[in-house]
Structures are given as C-alpha cells and as structure tokens.
Image (cartoon, rainbow, N blue to C red):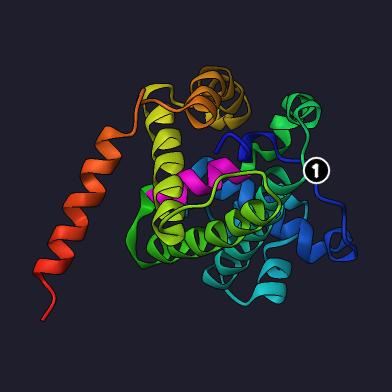
C-alpha cells in the first residue's frame, strides 16, 4: 500500500473525457463516501447529469458498481506495476504531492471491503492475482527479491496492506468522507515503518525461517502417501 499511496498519475485516455467516464468517477467518489447505498440520484448530482442518463449508460446501479470495480482495479494495477518496476526514489517522494488524487479509490476500496460479501471477496481475489503479476515483473526487473512462494507472498502483502488501511481509518475515521486527509495521515504514519521493514527486514538472523522450512519439509514428507 505504500506504493499505492504514491502512484503516478495515469494518463487521461479518450474514454475518460466522456459522460460515461464522468459518471463512473462520480460513482467511485459517492460510493467511497456513502457506501454502496448511495443513490443513483446522488451519483447523477455528483456527475452533473440526470439520473436517467446514469441508467442509460449503465442499465442499473449494480452494473455501474461492476464498472467501478474494473476501473479501480485497473488504476491500482497500472500504478503498482509502475511503482514496483520503474519508479525512482525521487519519483516516490514527489508523488506525496499527488496523494489526494487517489483518495476516492481508497475510499471505494474501504467501503467495498467493509460491505463484505461475494463482491468484496472477488475484488480481493483479483487484487491478489494482479499483485502476483506485478511482483513477478518487479523480480524480473531486479527491484525486489524472489520468493519461495510468489502466490503466497502476493496474498500476504495484499492482506497486510488492506488490513493496515482498514485499521487506520477505523482508528482515524475520515471527517465528512474526506479520504484525502486520511490518506495523507496514513502515508505520514506508515511510510517510514513500512519502508524500514521491507528494506531492512525485522529479524536479525534467519534461524526462525530455517526452522520453519525444516518443519514444513518434515510435515510434507510425513503427509506423502
């Protein structure tokens, strides 16, 4: 999540100049502030269009939610790939100034996970699959170390990152849905310990890892038919 909080602005594509994209972005903001009970009327007002135009473009609020999911996942995937494979330390620091731009995405993710259910589970599964892909790219680029179990590492990092954000916003609830302020506070609180932990490590030697690997190998051998 450190890289998510410092991701570069993605270029504007032609789709993002359309009424459909404006409605989608308005829905991400309203869902992030109000949760998924936000009305079509509220979303339309946010986008500056009529409720009928929202339905015309998306058919239903559930269909609009699905499009929002796709958009949020795409932006995160592109941003994380850039952060892990090509961003420089200077880029990392410069992006703190752009954090507010991504507040609606974080608000949306928080509301999606708090809502739970199949949609939240699907979102997490797709975020984990995306994480495994961009972490593999980062390994290939020589930016991070290889893992003995890339899929397990990707799932762990997603769980830790999402869990940290959820815990933070529970302890420091956004005021009037202002995830921009919450996001800045989270970045200030978490960047140092996260970078320290992921760069320098936590344990002073490998004895616990070696003991676990021996234990796991023994258990696997014992369970062989």
Q: Is residue 19 left or right of residue 110?
A: right
- Front-most of 108 and 55? 108
- Residue 163: quarter of image: top left
Q: Is residue 23 above or below residue 189?
A: below
- Front-most of 170 and 220? 220
Image: magenta residue range: 105-113
Q: Is residue 189 magenta?
A: no
Please name the predominant secondary structure of the magenta segment in the image: helix
Residue at point 83%, 59% (across, down): 16
Residue 180 pos. (x, y %)? 63, 28
- Front-most of 205 and 147? 205
Residue at point 55%, 26% (across, down): 195
Residue 30 pos. (x, y %)? 59, 47
- Image quarter in which the C terminus is found: bottom left
- Residue 68: quarter of image: bottom right
Q: Is residue 160 above or below residue 22?
A: above
Label 1 Cα neighbours within 10 Å, binned few <14 / some 14-19 / many ≥20: some
Q: Is residue 24 above or below residue 103?
A: below
Residue identified by numbered label 1: 9
- Front-most of 192 and 4? 192
Residue at point 9%, 67% (across, down): 222
Residue 25 pos. (x, y %)? 71, 53
Q: Is residue 48 left or right of residue 113?
A: right
- Image quarter in which the N terminus is found: top right
Residue 70 pos. (x, y %)? 62, 65
Q: Residue furthest bottom?
A: 225
- Residue 130: quarter of image: bottom right
Q: Is residue 76 left or right of residue 159?
A: right
């Amino acid at each position: 999540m450190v890289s998510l909080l410092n991701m570069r602005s993605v270029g504007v594509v032609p789709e993002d100049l359309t009424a459909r994209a404006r409605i989608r972005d308005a829905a991400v903001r309203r869902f992030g502030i109000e949760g998924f009970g936000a009305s079509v009327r509220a979303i339309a007002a946010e986008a500056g269009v009529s409720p009928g135009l929202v339905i015309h473009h998306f058919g239903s609020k559930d269909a609009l939610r699905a499009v929002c999911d796709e958009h949020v996942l795409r932006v995160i995937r592109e941003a994380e790939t850039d952060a892990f494979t090509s961003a420089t330390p200077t880029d990392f620091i410069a992006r703190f100034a752009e954090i507010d731009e991504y507040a609606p995405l974080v608000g949306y993710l928080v509301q999606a996970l708090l809502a739970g259910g199949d949609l939240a589970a699907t979102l997490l599964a797709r975020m984990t699959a995306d994480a495994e892909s961009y972490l593999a790219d980062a390994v290939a680029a020589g930016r991070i170390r290889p893992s003995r179990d890339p899929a397990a590492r990707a799932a762990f990092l997603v769980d830790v990152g999402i869990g940290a954000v959820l815990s933070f916003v529970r302890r420091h609830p956004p005021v009037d849905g202002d995830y921009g302020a919450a996001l800045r506070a989270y970045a200030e609180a978490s960047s140092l310990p996260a970078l320290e932990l992921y760069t320098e490590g936590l344990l002073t030697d490998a004895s616990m890892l070696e003991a676990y690997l021996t234990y796991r190998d023994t258990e696997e051998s014992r369970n062989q038919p």
